[in-house]
Image: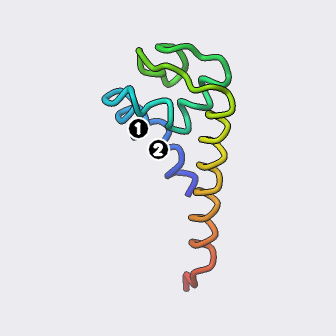
Amino acid sequence: MIIAVFAWAFAVELIVGGTATKVAPYLPYTAAAMMAGVTSGGGMPPIPRGVIPLAFPGAAGVLAGAAVLLAAVAAAAVNRDIT
């Protein structure tokens, strides 16, 4: 599960955010980085240029939604028998 989160943050989100800058502010890593004060084009991995940040409550909502989704997926994975 943790590998999937890192793969999302460092690969999928950068590709999606770089090709669709209108969607980028609604992606979890981008929202968190912009809340932390990273400007468009900065950060590591870099935020795509031309991204306009969400307002703080909107970015917090995006992160809360991502946390709920991740928790639901993790709960579904834990409840299955893996033997």
Residue at the location (35% across, 33% down)?
15
- Discs 1, 2 touching: Cβ within 8 Å: yes
- To which quarter of the image does residue 17 belong? top left
- Which quadrant would the C terminus be assigned to in this image? bottom right
Indicate the secondary structure of the residue bearing disc 1. helix
Amino acid marked by disc 2: Trp
Q: Which residue is mark 2?
A: 8
- To which quarter of the image does residue 69 belong? bottom right
Indicate the secondary structure of the residue bearing disc 2. helix
Q: Which mark is residue 3?
A: none
Q: Whole-Å distance between the Cαs marked 1 and 2?
A: 6 Å
In the figure, is residue 47 to the left or right of 81?
Answer: left
Amino acid marked by disc 1: Ala
Q: Which residue is mark 1?
A: 11
Q: Nearer the viewer, residue 11 or 38?
A: 38
Q: Work out whether 71 lies above or below 38.
A: below
